Amino acid sequence: MKELAQEQDGAAARLDRRASGLSPVTRSDILEAALTLFATRGYYGTSLKDVAHAVGLRAPSLYNHIEAKSDLLVEIVFETLAHVGAELEEAIEAHVDLHDRLYAATYAYALRHAVHRREALVVNQDARHLPEHDLSRAQSLRRFQERRFRQIISDGVDSGLFDVPSAKLASFAIREMCVSAARWFHEGGDFTAEDVARNFATQAVRMVQGPIR
């Protein structure tokens, strides 16, 4: 974060990259800058001028690449949800045993949130600022992911493997545990991202085993 702040402080003095002979700015450069800024400042706390300065452009030049700030949020959110969905499905479909399915799904979900913290923060904090049509689509995708967790738990309860009062609440608790990693995890701490994912997956399986008797 310190490095980002230093870069932003010096951005006002830069010339347009194209005019200065530097390599042209790509849409990927702009999305990367927006991702960092949205994650640290929030969507409404970030202006297009901030994004332009972060990539070394004058603000008017940014409109050669995008039409509006919301375009950046839409692309970040849906690309993130696509990756999350694909990884979750791969984890679930790789296993038949319900214990293994829940472990693998939780591991994948937790690892994604620990490794891709910026994306997770933007989706969880700023998806609500999407244009109405896009917000409805994003909410539908997130509900589908929630149902995938809930179905594993419900199937376990129906088969007598799991014992929980509410599959919906158990699913919510497991997902919230995973999502929390985006808020506190950092490389170089006491745990690796894989440590976090393994521990959360283990806790998820223990959670559905029923009360200690």
Image (spheres, rainbow, N blue to C red):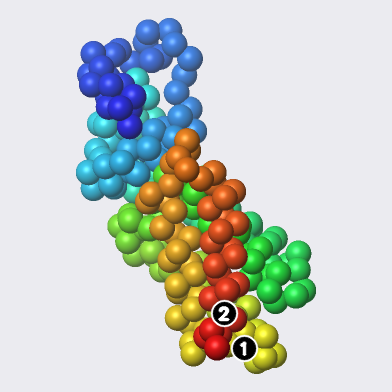
User: Horizontal and vertical percent for residue 55?
Assistant: 37, 24
Residue drawn at x 59%, y 63% as measured from the top left: 201
Q: Residue at x 33, y 56 (%)?
A: 125
Mark 1 crowdedness (10 Å alpha carbons): few <14, some 14-19, many ≥20 = some
Tell me the quarter of the image containing the N terminus. Answer: top left
Examine the rendered structure and indicate whether residue 142 appears above or below residue 76.
below
User: Which residue type does callout 2 highlight?
Assistant: Val
**Image location (x, y in percent) of residue 45:** 22, 43
**Residue closest to the eye, 30 or 118:** 118
Tell me where residue 95 sits by quadrant. Answer: bottom right
Q: Does 211 appear above or below 100?
A: below
Q: Pinpoint residue 210: horizontal percent, then vertical percent.
A: 55, 85
Helix, strand or loop at disc 1? helix
Q: On the rendered structure, is 49 left or right of 188?
A: left
- Element marked by disc 2: loop
Residue 138 lies in quadrant: bottom left
Q: Which residue position holds label 2?
A: 208
Check disc 1 and report the residue beneath it: 157
Which circle, 2 or 1, is nearer the viewer?
2
Which residue occupies 63% across, 71% down?
Answer: 102
